[in-house]
Image (tube, helix red, strand yellow):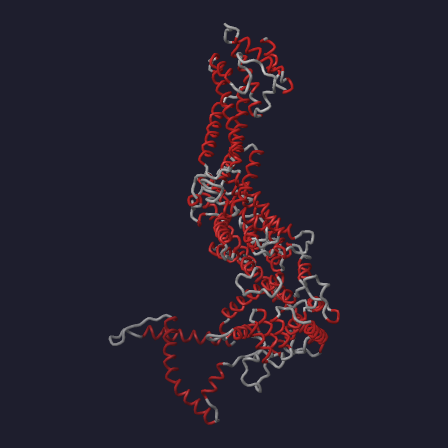
Amino acid sequence: MANDQEMSGWTDLLHSSTKLLEHAGPSAHFPSLQRNLDQLESLSKKLKSKTIRAEAPSQSISATRLLAREGINAERLARDLKSFELKTTFEDVFPSEATTVEEYLQQIHEMAMVSSIQEAQKDNLRSFNDHMMQVLEEDWQKEKRDFLQSLSRLSTLPRGNSSILSSGFSSTVQMPPQASSPHVSKTSSNMEVMPMANKSIIEKKASVYAEILRNLNDARGRGLHFKPATAFRDAYESMGLDFSGMRSVTMQKIWHLIQALVGEYSNNRQKFSRKMSLVIGARRHLEWGHEKYILDMIKTHPSQAALGGAVGNLEKIQAFLRVRLRDHGMLDFDTTDIRRQPPIDTTWQQIYYCLRTGYYDEAKKVAESSRAAHQFAPQLAEWIASGGSVSPETAAVASEECEKLLRMGDRAGRPGYDRKKLLLYAIISGSRRQVERLLRDVPSLFGTIEDFLWFKLSAIRDCPGGSSSIVLSEGLVPYNLDDLQGYLNKFEPSYYTKNGKDPLVYPYVLLLSIQFLPAVLYLFKEVGEEGYNVDAVHISIALADNGVLSDGIGTDRKIGVMDACAEVASIIRQYGSVYLRQGNLELALEYYAQAAAAMGGGEVSWIGRGSSDQQRQRNMMLRQLLTEVLLQDGGISLLLGPRGTGEEGALSKYIMDWNSRQQFLLEAARQCQEAGLYDKSVEIHKRVGAFSVALETVNKCLSDVICAMSRGRLDGESRAASLIQSGNDILENFKYSSGVSLQEKEPVSEQQTVLRQLEAILHISKLARAGQHVDALREIIKIPFLPLNPRVPDVHYDVFQKLSPHVQACVPHLLKITLNCLDNVKDTDGTLRALKSKIANLVANNMNRNWPQDLIEKVAQSI
């Protein structure tokens, strides 16, 4: 009814206004205006606002006067109203409409169920959106990498050696074509053919890491100080490769961990054992990560942190606690009036987070200044000073306090605050029983694996003889590194990596638990576009150089210390062998040197401070690898230089003693000869001054060529000419060499005679093939080492007794040539018949020499 009356009122008003418009005529004083409803509404609001502004001062004055009459300060009231907040009451949420308790509880149950369902729907929707965004981000990153790598491949298509293989190390060492030539200088072989931006991730890592390796080997060879882990980390950061998306562990983080483990950025810790120093290094890395975390948290919540200007470490921890405990009311370090509101005691929180962040001095300061932690302060000071190895008495007291706290449980109304106290006493006690019981009874202590590992590493005690060798008072066994490794190894790698979504978490955990060899082997097997296998090689180099491989075997007791070094040396060697196959001998040599150093204990092997067994293993492997390089094309010029035995080449950097170098080269030359690499054997023997051996090798090769020519080899003449030239060069070098011993002169003279005898046989063979049979027979008669001169009476001694085996092998060939020449020349004076008789007697007297059957038949036919 009210609506009908209202509509009729509006209708009457409209009718009246229409009549007025009809009767109203145009006026010269008042022009006609037309406005629609929106314009009228806007004008009315503007008019109303002017009225309100005019009335506001009078209303404000009246209100202030009224409040003053009642004794109320208007300014204070306005200030309080700004902080006034409306809060819902219990009745607002749960209206009391029920008449019985059962109905009331039924209403509460229904409302709770509806609220839970709504909250679950919101959480599901939020989780789904987050998951979709994460998937989209990962897909985008993958598409971007694929696109950039496709551009890289397109830009390198004209180059023959730049194709990137799908797996393995082949893609890591794609060298420029000129690198395979032994005559290219060091500078040109290392030139960058394409810009770094156009390279794949694997090529970038291989190139940058190789430069650091050169610097490392150069520093070790000259006895200079060098930090390999720091250098590798800086090199990795310079590439800018960590676009990991949602991954919690990146390779940059792993390199920082390696740097912390080997102690390259911390103070000297010689008072601790090497294994305990590694544990402390892992703990320092986690503390560095937590410091970064709290600074990010403060930066994200600046108003709640209320950090202020220039502050110390303790102020950072307090600012972090303001953010972390923002829903728990006033904190003790922020209160000014204790009587106003009881503050929350954060003593144990401050001590724990100071230790967790590496602020040890601040932790002691808090403990000493607090009444709640006054008894804990000396125990904490002892733990910090001793690096975690407190006395048995202190450990027993801390263990007893843990028992008391576990029996007591959480305090009513203060859940969780004494847990930090429990953690701290468990760390001080270092008791295996307390550590394991704490994790079993309070499983929600740690929110991240980093917090969990920091607690475990802090509780570890140094037990040189195993866990059973040190027992605390009252039979408490200390928690040691083996316990931690055994616990972590119960889980499969997929548990840590989330089925491959975060692949570096598992090797990160292994490295934090001082399991270096398993971590390196796991990364080495990860072949993919990220190039983790390349990182594994250089991580093993950094660990091996610092000599910590023997302490990072892990729980596999079947692997010994030398086996661990051999495993890592094999990885480095395998990586370097790819460069060898590509023709980059210089870079292969650098990696081979590190492989041998890893076998010898790292840096100490360069200066001879390793054990005798390590030095023997290192020298054995180094000689083997250097020989492998030496046998390649260009290996002699790389290792020995243009002349000498390595003084001007790379060999002097690895074998500095001249006698050792000579012994190595002689052994390498022997291997060359056994492998049929006679040219390299000759060159090496010439370098070390063994001219007689070099000349004997030339004679052997020349003898083989002459015998091959008798069987119809076509290229024998050119090869024979080259060998004779090589022999003459050896004799020339011997003639002008100043360091030749007297014992070398006689063997050289004997081998020179053999060379001339073979040269004479070769000359006769040439004359016979040219059809100059008479000239060939004249030369045969002149040969002094065979009794074939018809004018000389027969002799009855063994003519082969003093004849070189290389010449003896050519005698059947020479006799065949003689018989062929006799068949083509007429006998005018009986000389040729006498020569045939000489040949027949020579063959008859040497039937035991197993000469060819065709020679014997030919002699029989000629008689």
Quarter where residue 74 is shown: bottom left
How many marks can you see? 0
Q: Quadrant of the C terminus?
A: top right
Compare residues 562 and 710 and report the one nearer the observer.
Answer: 710
395 with respect to 663 (left or right)? right
Q: Can residue 527 be seen from the camera position used here?
A: yes
Image point (36%, 78%), residue name: 47
Q: Is residue 673 above or below residue 718?
A: below
Q: Is residue 631 above or below residue 712?
A: below
Q: Is residue 817 above or below residue 264?
A: above
394 with respect to 718 (left or right)? right
Compare residues 300 and 665 and report the one nearer the observer.
Answer: 665
Image point (48%, 14%), residue name: 778
Q: Position of residue 154 (x, y in %)?
A: 45, 43
Q: Is residue 315 above or below residue 524?
A: below
Give the residue at the far right of this rendering: 475
Image point (50%, 28%), residue name: 752
Q: Can residue 584 be seen from the camera position used here?
A: no
Compare residues 751 and 444 and report the one nearer the observer.
Answer: 751
Q: Position of residue 681 (x, y in %)?
A: 53, 35
Q: Position of residue 773 (x, y in %)?
A: 48, 12
